[in-house]
Image (tube, rainbow, N blue to C red):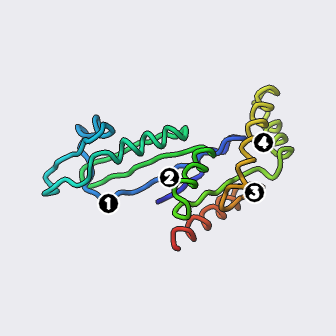
Amino acid sequence: MIVNLIGTKPGELQFLCQIKDTGCGMSSDFMDRMFQPFEREENRTSDNVQGTGLGLGIARSFTELMDGELQVESQLERQNILFDVDVKGGCSLKEYYGERALFIFVQAPSVEVLRERLIGRGDTSAEEIEKRISKAEYEMTFAKYADKVIVNDDLGKAKRDLLEIVEKFLDE
């Protein structure tokens, strides 16, 4: 699994999780119906089809409940599944998977620093800044549920810290 911080908007953190499946992949015809219950693809590379055909539909529903998005890119012999979730989704995943999941919260050093960064950009109205600050204050209340908290006072260091934490978790 590969995790990347892809959104750095103030008050919004977006991560992209990429899961590489070692299966045989899916045809483009099957991809049109793959989220339907009990759909399974039979193909030449496998003598039998395993599973119930419910997994992708459940994964999509679960991801959408967390305001996330599930995307699938596939070719026969190659498959990648991508999803991203917001901070509430991260809490839900952690609650559901327990120690099998890692919840990392990335935050600005303070609300004041966040406000200064937004004002410094010069491209955001005062009203929008206050909306973002309010959202960030709310999301910061979720930090106490995280396994790790990274303070983004230096973007390069925050990225390195994130990568180190994820790699250590995956190695355990």
Q: Which residue is mark 1?
A: 22
Expressed as whole percent of the image width and height from the top left, the position of residue 122 reads 79, 33
Q: Which residue does the image show at 44% across and 48% down from the upper left?
A: 82
Describe the element under mark 3 as helix, strand or loop: strand
Q: Which residue is mark 4?
A: 137
Tell me whether the residue at label 1 lies in contact with that at label 2, contact meaning CB atoms closer than 8 angstroms: no
Residue 54: quarter of image:
top left
Disc with the residue nearer the chain's start (3 vs 1): 1
Disc 4 packing (10 Å; few <14; some 14–19; many ≥20): some
Q: Please state which of residues 152 and 99 is positioned toward the viewer in this rendering.
A: 99
Q: Which residue does the image show at 52% across and 45% down from the upper left?
A: 84
Q: Which residue does the image show at 31% across and 47% down from the upper left?
A: 74
Task: Specify the amino acid type for callout 2.
Answer: Cys
Disc with the residue nearer the chain's start (2 vs 4): 2
Compared across the picture, whether 24 is left or right of 16 comes to left
- Give me the C-alpha separation between circle 1 and circle 4: 41 Å
Q: Which residue does the image show at 58% across and 60% down from the upper left?
A: 102
Expressed as whole percent of the image width and height from the top left, the position of residue 14 reads 60, 45
Q: Which residue is mark 3?
A: 151
Q: Please state which of residues 51 and 68 is positioned toward the viewer in this rendering.
A: 51
Expressed as whole percent of the image width and height from the top left, the position of residue 147 reads 65, 61
- Give me the C-alpha separation between circle 3 and circle 1: 35 Å
Disc 1 packing (10 Å; few <14; some 14–19; many ≥20): few
- Give me the C-alpha separation between circle 1 and circle 2: 16 Å
- Give me the C-alpha separation between circle 3 and circle 4: 14 Å
Task: Specify the amino acid type for callout 3.
Answer: Val
Task: Specify the amino acid type for callout 1.
Answer: Thr
Disc with the residue nearer the chain's start (1 vs 2): 2
Compared across the picture, whether 21 is left or right of 25 comes to right
Q: Which residue is mark 2?
A: 17
- Give me the C-alpha separation between circle 3 and circle 2: 21 Å
